[in-house]
Amino acid sequence: MSNRTNFISAVSNLLQDVRKKLRTALDMGLANSLRYLFFKPKQSLWVDLVTDDFVQTSISDVAMWRDFASKASSDSEVFEHFRRYEILRRIVETNDYFQGRQYLSNIFSLADQDETIYPKTLSDLVSEFDSVGSPLCYKYKTLGLASPLALRYLDTALEIKRLFNLKSVDLVVEIGPGFGGLALMNSRLMKVKDYWLIDLPEVVDLCSRFLDEFRTDTTFRDGLGLTSKQSYFDLVISNYAFSEIKRDMQVELAELVLSRSRKGYLVWNNLGETYMGGVTLKEFLSWVPNPRVLSERPLTANGNQIIVWGLDDV
Ligand SMILES: C[S@@+](CC[C@H](N)C(=O)[O-])C[C@H]1O[C@@H](n2cnc3c(N)ncnc32)[C@H](O)[C@@H]1O
């Protein structure tokens, strides 16, 4: 190719890129584009989760995440802005404005079917959740200011409540709860007695730190101490977590938790299978009774699926 052709193709790519960015900015609205542009993330460190030497039990079991979780739970200055840190935004706070919009549309249709939920309740739940950790929030016409993560968790909590027709539940266990955001939403939408959290020890500490900020009637428990004495659970949840863990640990967790749980809700991705030698979806489906596979909406990565079991109508 001549220099001239190279130049023309570079300019055309650049123009295409600018047009795409302008279209995105227009779609988000000026105020939201400015929020995005002027948002100041902390510690702009990139970690390649797949090749990091310290990957141990799962795709996100990396030294940088453990160290961060430990700092965020013990250092108040870090905790104050913990949802701005790159490592957290890489592992948990991963959703963008547009996904937020799709979660919001799910939320309104789920709330329509639930007489205990009002528009005011929805915005209160979201603002309460976003009042901690100074996340990036956007303005959504129908709800006001919200982080896309708050909308994802609210959508998931409403969906769990609807699918299993639950108003109250005694024993919930969540594998890989991140900083405990879904645990909070679940405890707000259902009456939950005990909520066990199974994650890396440093991350369970961060969950406790986060959940301590709120008054709830739920007792949140460190699931690392769980033994086979706990004979059953009502519901197990694991979103983008169990499916990212290595096989031998998946087998252990299946024995200890999944096989003892009457109902289950898992968002499944193929990271464990691809990078950690984890079980395949097909194999997993043979581990649980009468599973049903649902679509993830919005789809956040190719191949993601939602697996549920223990529905009343099955
Ligand atoms: C991609 S994040 C998902 C967080 C949260 N479930 C959500 O939907 O936002 C994966 C979670 O799995 C946790 N995790 C990593 N290794 C784990 C292990 N061996 N056992 C339990 N959880 C683990 C991480 O600390 C993190 O909380």
Image: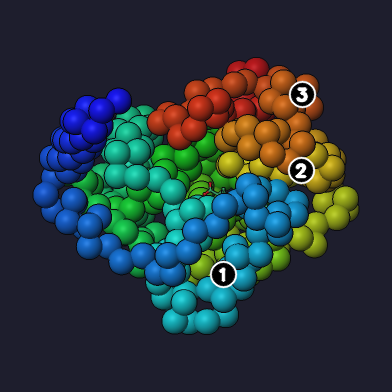
Q: Is residue 249 placed above or below 73 in the rendered structure?
A: above
Q: Is residue 297 placed above or below 76 in the rendered structure?
A: above
Q: Which mark sits nearer the N-terminus, 2 or 1?
A: 1
Name the residue: 70% across, 49% down: 58
The x, y position of residue 114, in whole percent, is 38, 35
Quarter of the picture holding the C terminus: top right
**In the foreground, 194 or 174:** 174
The x, y position of residue 169, in whole percent, is 61, 45
Instruction: Please state the total of marks drawn on the protein image.
Output: 3
Q: CA distance from mark 1 to mark 3?
A: 34 Å
- Residue type, label 2: Lys
The kind of secondary structure element at disc 2 is loop
Q: Which mark is residue 283?
A: 3
- Residue type, label 1: Phe
- Residue type, label 3: Glu
Name the residue: 41% across, 40% down: 155
**In the foreground, 288 or 81:** 81
Name the residue: 28% across, 56% down: 137
Q: CA distance from mark 2 to mark 1?
A: 22 Å
